[in-house]
Image (cartoon, coloured by chain):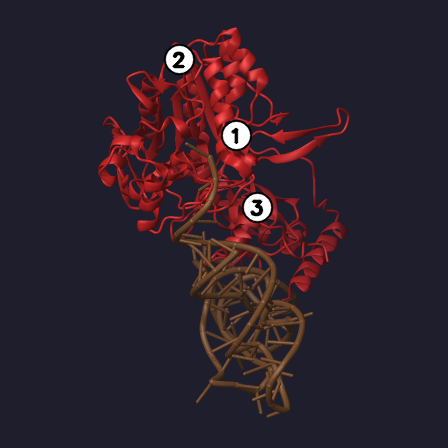
Chain colours: A red, B brown
Amino acid sequence: MADEKELFRVRLEKRRALEALGVNPYPTKYHRDATAASVLADFDTLAKEGTIVSLAGRLMTIRRMGKASFAHLRDRSGTIQLYVRKDRVGDDRYDIWKKIEAGDLVGVKGTAFRTKSEEPSIEVFAIELLSKSLRPLPEKWHGLKDKETRYRRRYLDLVANPEVFTVFEKRSRIVTTIRSYLDERGFLEVETPVLQPLYGGASARPFTTHHNALDIPLYLRIADELYLKRLIAGGAEKVYEIAKDFRNEGIDRTHNPEFTQLELYEAYSDYNDMMDIVEEMLLSVAIETAGSGRITYQGKNADLEKPWKRLSFVDELSGRLGADILSIEPPRLREECAKRKIDAPDAASAGMLLAELFDHLVEPSIDEPTFVLDFPKEISPLAKERPDRPGVAERFEPYLCGMEIGNAFSELNDPIEQRARFEAQLRLKGEEREEAQQVDEDYIRALEQGMPPTGGLGIGIDRISMVFTDQPSIRDVIFFPQLRPEKTPPGD
RNA sequence: GGGCCGUUAGCUCAGUCGGUAGAGCACCUGCCUUUUAAGCAGGCUGUCGCAGGUUCGAUCCCUGCACGGCUCACCA
């Protein structure tokens, strides 16, 4: 009687028995006027005044003792003990109660009292089945640990491990805090196309789909950048979008094929203003989620109350290599890579080699909240060049707790230059054209119309959610992370 | 894609130096009106991830595969 099918059959049997007793196993509504937490918060008053409270939730445990039972009822707010006595609910209702089991959703009415051991409880006089559960609960003591099952059946994970909710509540507060921050500063929240005839705004492989009526290929966006900047060209001045992007690439602890990004653009600003926004906005997120700017991620501390460290990509890497990286020829860069056993694809350009070297030599040592500045222009096709430093882009990437959490720049708004940059990208990427920025002629036309000088910023919402909820994997901040489909789906 | 680890009952896990397997929880039956990892008595439960190989015999050893985790690589 313990294999899965048998457990299911036994529960179905109980459902039938309940129906035979005139019980609808799936009624439409239940009126409740309290939660476990609200009762516990106000317990002594409720007990003294004998107030009738009505609660609803899932039965997690039942301890039956013949003509009386104890059970724990859980709702989103918490857990409270129920005491069900035969002489209080009546013989008929007690027969029904005997067919209700752990995992079922019920509504109860009763009064507050403390047991001999002082546990605050509800003495129930009316109990109603609200939804029959046909599958067993995971182990009551050890819970559900298997990660695969937890990710695949998040509903079961949430039942077995309610603390998972707190991570997602925090994630929600993070997004709310960001919205308030931007709304208060006059930013307009907008929506731009997910389905795009050209993909752009990042270097990544897209998901491809097809529109039947138009009979054209469409791509799921890899970024919203180029559309948001069209709005800036149209005079929007301050816009943002918090949206899903899709990148057809590998999955690991920090990458999910669909992920959420904040992108914002502010006219008449530059990347320095974007740094101010990152510092201020994330401090407000930290205060909201952690109570202060001091946070801990996986044992590492970060203090967001201090200004972020500035680290120059070009200077730092030049220091490590003992030469000005912007004037090193590609063969020498290849040597440097080889010396350190860093993979250097034949097609890699100077800029790509520099990015490789940086990722291996500098990135691992980034610990404090840091803005990595001064990226080579060649790997920053949408960013303006620094007027005082040719070859260097007005761009930065914020790093929090060692993790890259975004990307920002003074937006390139010279249409002639932008076209040249797009074309250079296509040449550089060679066969890997799919990852290159495509030449978006309409975007260039928008720049030709005239886009003000603009600062732009992208922040990975999943990544910062990992940090602010102290979760080691992106899968722990996404309810339904992408997994390979189950080999044998349920349903026999 | 490479390396390492995992996969045994619904859940959490043990185990078999090769002889087709166990515990606790859950579940079933009975008793029990202040229990709380309720208790007592009795009971049920398995393609040991999948497929080959070696062997008289494989859940165990070997090979391949699947799924997952970690990690390296790739990838903003």
Q: Chain of mark 3?
A: A
Q: Which mark is residue A155?
A: 3
Residue A81 image offset from top left, x and y in percent: 48, 48
Distance CA(mark 1)–CA(mark 2): 38 Å
Does residue B13 sit above or below A340 in this rendering? below
Does residue A314 sit above or below A472 in this rendering? above
Instruction: Please name the amino acid that badge 2 sits on.
Output: Arg
Q: What residue is at 27 percent from the left and 42 percent from the top?
A: A365
Q: Quadrant of residue A166?
A: top left
Q: Chain of mark 2?
A: A
Residue A135 image offset from top left, x and y in percent: 63, 55
Quadrant (top left, top right, bottom left, bottom right) of the C terminus of chain A: bottom right
Query: Label 2 near label 3: C-beta < 8 Å?
Result: no
Instruction: Please name the amino acid that badge 1 sits on.
Output: Leu
Q: Which mark is residue A185?
A: 2
Does residue A200 sit above or below A17 in this rendering? above
Q: Residues within 10 Å of mark 2 (few under 14, many from 20)?
A: few
Residue under label 1: A426
Q: Chain of mark 1?
A: A
Instruction: Please name the amino acid that badge 3 sits on.
Output: Tyr
